[in-house]
Image (cartoon, rainbow, N blue to C red):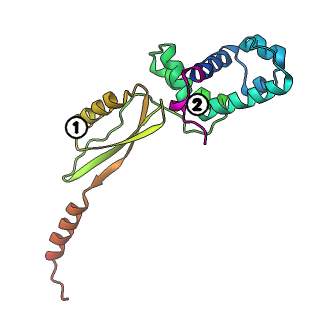
Amino acid sequence: MPKKYSQKSKATKYQYYNYLDKIIVSGKSISQIKRLNVKQWQKLFGKQGRLKKTSLEAKKRIIIQQISKDINQVVSDYIERKNIKNKDYKVFLYNESYKLFRIKKEEIKEINELKYEDITGNAQYGVVKVIDLKDNQEYYLKYKNKRGLKKQFKKLEQKYNIKNYVSKLLGIYTYKSHTTNEFKKRLENYDLII
């Protein structure tokens, strides 16, 4: 079974970061990278000892597959190492890396924005899904008001060291017990013969 990104060595993570950086700087597409010969590969990525054509093909295939599989984590490392602060640029890097590596993922519109909707009814609550882009871990937050949601998120952010995330409002719901009680109250208003 392949290792998760978090279980990989620092050297491997740095190698992925380094390759991604050089691919971005080169302006080449992945199909162009796949067509590079030994000389072109070494010019772009540096000499890595004696490299035969067959071993180069395997190396290209493995590295491209691994980076594509762990794209969010690799881009998160890239953002962290380059110390990128601009939210729009972060969104751009995630979305463009999906296109570059031809990964079908939902396009990110906003990063580090906590989605919520005000709750107007009694006995209602909202549910927000937060996805940490560092490891694609999903967290679900249940809230009654904006202040409570922010407080919960702050704890989550500190506990799991979340730096870049996307959030999605899953909906506003009513407690089942409240719905059942309301139904019983309304049912009592009708004269029903049972």
Does the rendering let one see residue 180?
A: yes
Marked residue nearer the N-terminal end (2 or 1): 2
* Helix, strand or loop for disc 2: helix
Dots 2, 1 in contact, CB < 8 A: no
Q: Observer-nearest residue: 138 or 119?
A: 138
Q: Which residue is mark 2?
A: 71
Please give the name of the residue rendered at 22% of the width and 47% of the height, measured from the top-left corner: 120
Q: Quadrant of the C terminus?
A: bottom left
In the figure, 101 relative to 187: above or below? above
Magenta-highlighted residues: 1-12
Q: Amino acid at mark 2?
A: Ile
Callout 1 crowding tier (Cα within 10 Å): few <14, some 14–19, many ≥20 = few
Specify whether residue 43 is painted magenta.
no
Q: Is residue 37 left or right of residue 102?
A: right
Please state the horizontal and vertical placement of residue 75, each as a whole percent of the image: 55, 24
Instruction: Give the distance between the C-alpha atoms of the residues marked 2 and 1, in whole angstroms.
Output: 32 Å
Please state the horizontal and vertical placement of residue 132, each as a whole percent of the image: 43, 33
In the figure, 42 relative to 73: above or below? above
In the figure, 150 relative to 143: above or below? above
Specify the label residue 148 is tagged with: 1
Name the residue at the bottom extreme. Answer: 194
